[in-house]
Amino acid sequence: MATNFDAWQGEFDSSKLRKAPFKTMSGIPLAPVYGPQDGSGEYPGQYPYTRGPYASMYRSKLWTMRMFAGFGTALDTNWRFKEIIKSGGDGLSTAFDMPTLLGLDSDHEMSLGEVGRCGVAIDSLADMEDLYAGIDLSKITTSMTINSPAAVIFAMFVAQAEKAGVHRSQLGGTLQNDILKEYQAQKEFVFPPRPAMRLVRDTIAFTAAEMPRWHSISISGYHIREAGSTAAEELAFTLANGFAYVELAMKAGLPIDSFAPRLSFFFNAHIDFFEEIAKYRAARRIWARWLKERYGAVEARSLQLRFHTQTAGVSLTAQQPEVNIVRTAIEALAGVLGGTQSLHTNSMDEAMALPTERSARIALRTQQVIATETNVAHVADPLGGSWYVEQLTDEIERQAEELFAYIDQLGHGSMLEGAFRGIDDNWYQGRIADSAYELERQVNNGQREIVGVTGYTEGNDEEQMPLLQITNEDEARQLKRLGEVRATRDQRAVDAALGRIAHEAADPDINLMPALIEAATVYATLGEMMGTMETVFGRHIEVPTI
Amino acid sequence: MPAPRILVAKVGLDGHDRGIKVVARILRDAGMEVIYTGLFQTPATVAAAAVDEDVDAIGLSMLSGAHLTLAPAVVEAIRKLGGDIPVIVGGIVPNPDIATLKAAGIAAVLTPGATSDQIVADVRAVLAAHPH
């Protein structure tokens, strides 16, 4: 009788493989995966995909080394992108500054002092043109970390690519577009949850119809964890948000297998090595089960959870920053052993500032060492079958299921309504703050040690390494650029395009993407488009709680 | 002696509120009365709230790199209202900026890695130096 192993072997043999000597340093040949002698058990590429979404995993393709970058003006970041491509990074990931994340133009009074600081400033299509100038977007995939104004920035991106001659259907990449976690954790929200979710629905429907290579949403646990949650909370809130997006799209009439394959995930890689690996394994298993059993997905691609990983910013210390290279390497290794599809490694200086070019290069080198020197990518799910890791996987799954049950009950049988209600009730926010405080308490009472902070402090008084300086000149240059755009565009076309957005925003059955792309094309600014929608949608205000 | 009253605030566009919530709880557990403004405040709204609430100190949490612009603006806004309330900045502040902030009238700067005990001690020291 054919075993699971035989089925896996058939699948593996039909996969395209990378050329590399798959053996240990001393010459011992390595199988692509290991399992029980009798060929029973689960193998990578087999439901529920605990061991990985694909049969051949890194034997076909290593993870994408996707380095997050963005600072100053679009021209500054374009230069950094080209450096990343030159040093072997194979995917771009765009960080936007605070005003852009909140849908404000650089000349808004609240933007003062924030322009270009935490990421790149984008006000209009003109900035988007600078950002990707000289980069072939039909060849390299691009990820954009943007949420509240995701639909607008995405519209500018599509308009820019098509102006440069790349049709939207050829564009590959990911829009973060995960608004639920903004209310729960990252707090960069603009509109109230329900109209904000309408924009998410519009982007999912638009990409399902017109952009087969695009991931409409990257459902993100990263920020939930950075805000202080435990690993199980990160996993559970993220997947529960994923279920909410699935229900949102199904409610809009999209067949599940038409959009589920384009949903992707983004998890944290924190410093507790085995717990992180167990978390990724549990994530794949839970997603597959829920999509199949609760939502009726049939296609394997709908069931296979694929994810991006970023090492934990909060684990970095300002003290003895070089030690952060070690933390990041351990965290990155957890992501790889957990089977991540792409990875960003943080730079050593990020507890103090945005990274310098040098520290960002060392962070990329960290991944390259894991990929090329250690041989860890030769064997899929190398910790599968470890009694420890298997039981930890089961336990994290059990804790997540408890949280799903609570959210489901909050929503009276709807994970979408449960998400809305949990946000309104401050339930997610409170749980995350409780977990953050508990961790701090453990550090303060000595239960949890941090090298260079709670001990091992010799060297803390050494001179600080040079940090990236963002000057106010960047802000001034951006303001000048925005002024030129406003002065030279066809104002009548802008007014007409904004009028169309206002009109269509008021009708929840209309997909807003075409109107946003039209407005982007005539150089309407981010702030103008967001402001127009705000007149219809209103604004979200969080009740402050400690 | 009544419990010291502290206003903790997020000024500007930065939504990262983990630090401010943890610090608020630390100060509350140390016996202080803590008022949190919520997100997206301006220097003017923070100063007005601090004067209205008659607080003993203000804690600003800043992680976006805008501290050199926004923190001195809070000090200035309080002066404009005729107040004399010490302002403490906590968050991601590169070392060279600490002296700049102090020169601009910031009473203390708490940097990453400060333990709960250090935070409480630093806030108490500021309160002692600025009797209400």
Image (cartoon, rainbow, N blue to C red):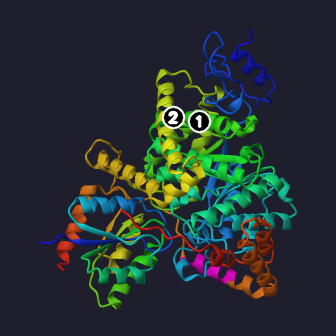
Instruction: Report the quarter where the N terminus of chain A lies.
Output: top right
Q: Chain of mark 2?
A: A
**Residue A278 location (% of width, % of height):** 52, 33
**Residue A349 location (% of width, % of height):** 48, 56
Position of residue A268 relative to residue B114, above or below, is above
Q: Looking at numbered disc 2 in the image, what kind of residue is underneath it?
A: Glu
Instruction: Report the quarter where the C terminus of chain A lies.
Output: bottom left
Residue at image position (74%, 75%) is A501
Give the residue at mark 2: A397
**Residue B89 location (% of width, % of height):** 35, 70
Examine the image and state in which quarter residue B82 appears. Answer: bottom left
Q: Chain of mark 1?
A: A
Q: Is label 1 in contact with label 2 (beta carbons under 8 Å)?
A: yes
Of marks 1 and 2, which one's residue comes earlier in the chain? 1
Q: Is residue A432 magenta?
A: no
Q: Secondary structure at mark 2?
A: helix
Q: Nearer the viewer, residue A526 or A505?
A: A505
Which of the labelled discs sits on residue A286, or is there none?
1
Stretch of the chain drawn in magenta: A472-482
Residue at image position (68%, 63%) is A199
Q: Nearer the viewer, residue A214 or A364?
A: A214
Examine the image and state in which quarter residue A356 appears. Answer: bottom right
